[in-house]
Image: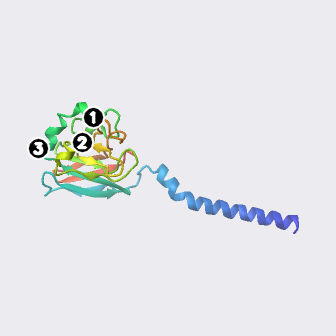
Amino acid sequence: MSNKRRDFLLSGTSIMAGVLGSVALTPSIKRWTHTNYGEKPRIITINGMMPGNIMAFTWNNKSFYILKRTKEMLESLNTINDQLKDPESRYSLQPENCKNQHRSIKEEYLVVYNHCTRVGNSLMVNNKQETYLKNVGFYCTDEGSRFDFAGRSFIGSPGGPNLHIPHYYYKDDNTIVIDKSIF
């Protein structure tokens, strides 16, 4: 084979490998650098939710929960600070307006990312307050992470920091709008 032909085939193959590689990596790069610019806000209607009810939804390919906490769930938040890794949520991903005891804008509604902070598994909800999971609001069945009804991680739980809270606001008393991600 002539040098000219070999050089032509080599450069053609290199160009095709580069094009195919960039096409294959594009979804991953978009995911790594995604900033939510241009994302439509997610609007969720919460009227009709009864205390203890949970609503699951997705936004930006991530799943979330909205929990309407009962009076007992809210009362439990004040009694377990000594059992939590970060009770004041100093090291948590959450908007400024949710840095409080209940980690929400309105104390009865918790809007939270539905994945464990250790390995990313979907969480189960203990909205019936089973006695064997006293004060545990969310738990991971795979590796045992436990979080309270504000998404704060328990000491001794394999889970990392507290559950993530997205940026959201209330459009009115019955409508929550999630407008940007914290990730």
Residue visible at 28% across and 58% down in the picture: 57
Depth check: 178 or 138 in front? Answer: 138
From what the image shows, is residue 19 above or below residue 142? Answer: below
Tag 1–tag 2 contact (CB < 8 Å): yes
Q: Which residue is mark 1?
A: 84
Residue visible at 62% across and 63% down in the picture: 20
Name which of mark 1 and mark 2 comes first in the sequence.
Answer: 1
Q: Which residue is mark 3?
A: 71
Q: How crowded is the residue under tag 2: few (<14 C-alpha within 10 Å), some, or many (20+)?
A: many
Name which of mark 3 and mark 1 comes first in the sequence.
Answer: 3
SS label for mark 2: loop
Name which of mark 3 and mark 2 comes first in the sequence.
Answer: 3
Rendering quarter of residue 163 = top left
From what the image shows, is residue 110 above or below residue 61? Answer: above
SS label for mark 3: helix
Residue visible at 17% across and 42% down in the picture: 107
Q: Which residue is mark 2?
A: 148
Label 3 – label 2 distance at C-alpha? 14 Å
SS label for mark 1: loop
* Residue 50 percent location from the top left of the image: 12, 54
